[in-house]
Image (tube, rainbow, N blue to C red):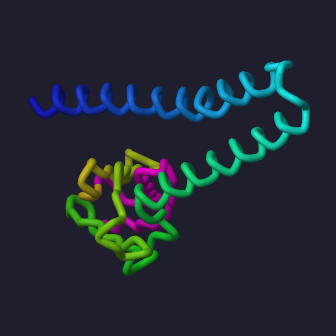
Amino acid sequence: MSDKNEAIEEYKSGISKWWVITGILLFPLVPFALIYLNKKINKYVRGALIVIWFIVLCGVYQFACIKQGPVIKSISVPVSTISMKVGTSHQISYDVKPQSSNLKIDEVKYTSSNRSIATVDKKGNITSISPGKTTITITVQDNHYTQRTKKITLLVLK
């Protein structure tokens, strides 16, 4: 059931991205084209209307950004290197800055550069498999589609 919910959520987020892109492209262009192509209006009035429209767009954009909340500035982890024995597990922890209740994290991805040495699941649980050195990457994305990445070196010992 969890996979089904993830698929539905992914589908919903795809729709919202499409609407955002469409809005960004069409919202400013349609009135701009109507003003620019209207030859009945004096060219100075058209220029003034285009400037006014640009100011309105800037205001709408600023309002939308404020409404969305802050953007992720950085990710920090308590340690940059982790040592583990084969067959053990470890939970990765991280902090994002700014620490704000308005900051909305959309997605967190954990990846291992060498899955034969260690794997990491969706919740940040590392499982060591064989001795060696690998890099665990944490990628955090906020609701502005801003991504920040942090790498941790993992040493798996016998």
Q: Position of residue 56 (x, y in %)?
A: 62, 48
Q: Main secondary structure of the magenta part?
A: strand
Front one among 133 and 144: 144
- Using residue 96 as the reference point, say whether residue 53 is left or right of it: right
User: Looking at the figure, which quarter contains the N terminus?
Assistant: top left
User: Looking at the figure, which quarter contains the C terminus?
Assistant: bottom left
Residue lying at the far left of the rendered structure: 1
Residue located at (49% from left, 34% from top): 20
Front one among 91 and 5: 5
Residue 83, compared with residue 141, is above or below; it is: below
Residue 3, compared with residue 67, is above or below; it is: above
Front one among 53 and 83: 53
Front one among 148 and 42: 42
Residue lying at the far bottom of the rendered structure: 78
Q: Position of residue 45 (x, y in %)?
A: 83, 37
Magenta residues, as a range? 129-158
Q: Using the rendered view, name the quadrant where residue 44 is placed.
A: top right
Residue 54, compared with residue 23, is above or below; it is: below
In this rendering, the count of numbered labels is: 0
Q: Is residue 99 magenta?
A: no
Q: Position of residue 139 (x, y in %)?
A: 44, 55
Residue located at (46% from left, 61% from top): 66
Residue located at (16% from left, 26% from top): 4
Residue located at (49% from left, 56% from top): 63
Q: Is residue 156 magenta?
A: yes
